[in-house]
Amino acid sequence: MARHNSIGYRKKVLLAARLVGASALGGVLVAGLALPAVGAAGLGAQSAVEDFDSLPDDFRTPPLSQASTVYDAAGGTIATIYSRDRTVVDADAMSPLVKTALVDIEDSRYYQHGAVDLKGVLRALNSNAASGTTAQGASTLTQQYVKNVFVDQAGDDVQKVQEAQRQTLDRKIRELKYAIKVEETLTKDQILANYLNITFFGEKAYGIETAAQRYFSVHAKDLSLPQAALLAGLVQSPSAYDPIVNPAAAKTRRDTVLRRMAELGHITAAQAAEAIATPVELKVTRAHQGCITAGTGEGFFCDYVQRVVLSDPAFGKTPEERKALWKRGGLQIRTTLDPKAQKAVQQAVTAHAAPSDRPAAVMSVVQPGTGKVLAMAQSRPYGLGKDQTTINLNVPKKMGGGLGFPTGSTFKPIVAAAALENGIPVSRTYTSGYSMPWPAMQDCSGGRFPESGEVHNDSRDLIGSFAMPAAMKQSVNTYFANLEAETGLCEVSKTAAKLGITQQAGGEKLSVVPSMTLGSNDLTPLEMAGVYAAFAAHGTYCAPTAITSVTGPDGKSLAVPKASCTEALSQTTADTVTAMLRGVVEDGGTGHTAGLSDRETAGKTGTTNEGRQVWFVGYTPEMAAATVVSDTMNPAPLEGQRMGGERIDAAFGGAVAGPIWRQAVEDALDGVPAGEFTAVRLPSAAEPSDSEQPTPGTGRPTQGGGQPATGQPTQGGRPTRGGDQTAPATGRPVPGGSGRPTHGTGGTTPATGQPGPGAGQPSPSGGQ
């Protein structure tokens, strides 16, 4: 048996000699001898050689996946995000000790051989032949580096990772081809630095800099001898020698590295002995990454930033290009988030609503004239745990949000702006009763909505003649039904589009129906804040923007989405709307609870059907903000529910959302000089008007409309909240109906926070 083994060994040596003589196929030598029974490879080996010749000549190392960092406007870190926790550093930012330790333990002849170490091959062959195994490999550091590149390139695809690690002859040959090319184009020091940047060191740490931070909380350049030896020893098996999980095994491996360094004369025996005598001392910095780690409620904004990168063509023409950019990482993303405003908004929403409350408070803040998103918060934290959610209710579904909320009467200023833009004076007066039929209207495509149904005001006292300012201040539904009819549905929808409202939050087309004036469309706080920011900016609408600059791994600036600002309204129209909305927050207005005492304020309340959602959207010259409160568990009327430890007795925008808005904006602007709105003279209630119009469609007001004892209008003998109807699911006009959508999508299902049905019918009963 011994003689048989000796003959087999001699055959393998002879084969090695022949391969050495064939210098052009030096790469095949390593692959063949590292595998068992290669002498019998036969036609398989021949095929592999042919594959070798057909491989591309150049080898391009893919950019290494690194961590990206998202910063707020003041330079503070919001979150670090990565698919690979890696920070690439230059060679001079790595301790010489760790370079020496790695070479000594993994490839001590690294600086003497090329891509292939023939002596190492023969040594491995001898060892493996004697043991009858392939326990000892002959891969050089360069070959290991090439393999690591392929593994890193495979990402999280298990099948591709396994393919990159397959122990087959053709894979070995492929690696050798690239290893030879790498040695031709890079210096040994460059290859070693690349190796240390790409290698996995366990505990989710990729690269020597992250490994040094993970285990010792130091930079790679500051590693001590024992620390450097421990990390070099991890490369062979990061899990087996994990010092956190297996400290004894890690010390044994570390000491092996130290002895090898002394054996090769790179440290003295005394240095080795001293290092071996020291225990393994760790100072672990655990991996924390992703938007879920963001503080001060910034997780939702962080999520929004990520989705901007993945969706905006500025970051790549195709979704695949944008995804590759994000996955590759190494990005330094500077954003618009104002930490002071964010803290104020977060404190306000959480002060009024607890995470476990069924009602949730949601708020976005935008800077007028720029569109910069200054703050974004929800009372329910960003996360996957109990009473948490990753659905950002501030934004549309396509940006990680839900299906939005009906806006209630906060939509009325858009109708007023459309009327003013189309020549209807602010003094326009309509006389109507508590309730009236919806006037006949027509949409942009010619679809007719005949006079039908009924719309009523929130209070029976809201009857008589109203001009636009008084109707806005008291949120008179019947007035705005008349104003919408005179202006035209099409003109209202065109004005909404100029202000960024082109579709509903779920992606459906805007429902251009009579009840649009009462907020029947499902929109988001960020969208509504953008609308009101245009009023504050004298008619200039700026699409919300969250990113100011991005630099790549090479330090070069990348293109970012450009600010998109347009003149949506004339300055006269915008300033007139502002003047009217200032009245809303004054005494007698539905939003008086939100008015600030130290600076000029304008805004509008909104309440949806049965008080399922309540809004306050307002602004100062410095910022515009939208606040909505809704039951997001299983949307139900807010009245009677508990929020922030108190019972909601009156579910109106001014009573519930207004105080949240006021606290947030007041604190956000603390110490900021107060600006002023442009003064506009509005007609007083006592002034006679020469612009009184009859109720469109009928020419006569109604004074009660057969109200039941509840004060609700009737239709077909049943109490309703307005009687405005649409065909099921389509929102198209139907005979005898005036087009109120029957769907509702303001909330979320109990366990997941996913948008659920049945939330948020528009309220034709007013916008308190």
Image: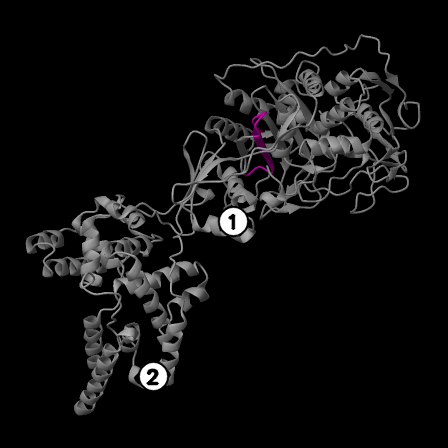
**Residue 727 locus on image (x, y percent):** 83, 45
- Please state if 760 lies on the left or on the right of 166 as rendered: right
Depth check, front residue: 39 or 258: 39
- Please state if 704 lies on the left or on the right of 182 as rendered: right
Name the image quarter holding residue 464.
top right
Provide the secondary structure element on which disc 2 rests.
Answer: loop
Whether 569 is drawn above or below 218: the answer is above
* Amino acid type, residue under disc 1 in the picture: Arg
- Please state if 635 lies on the left or on the right of 4 as rendered: right
Name the image quarter holding residue 639.
top right
Residue at the image position 84 percent from the left and 11 percent from the top: 689
Q: Residue furthest right?
A: 699
Whether 257 is drawn above or below 394: the answer is below
The residue singled out by tag 1 in the image is: 322
Provide the secondary structure element on which disc 1 rests.
Answer: helix
Q: Is residue 249 magenta?
A: no
* Amino acid type, residue under disc 2 in the picture: Ala
**Residue 373 locus on image (x, y percent):** 54, 31
- Please state if 361 lies on the left or on the right of 760 as rendered: left
Residue at the image position 54 percent from the left and 34 percent from the top: 377
**Residue 424 locus on image (x, y percent):** 81, 20
| Residue 247 can be seen, yes or no | no
| Residue 494 can be seen, yes or no | yes
Quarter of the figure that contains the C terminus = top right
Q: Earlier in the sequence, mark 2 or mark 1?
A: 2
The residue singled out by tag 2 in the image is: 41
The segment highlighted magenta reads 356-371
Depth check, front residue: 551 or 735: 551
Mark 1, other Cα within 10 Å: few <14 / some 14–19 / many ≥20: many
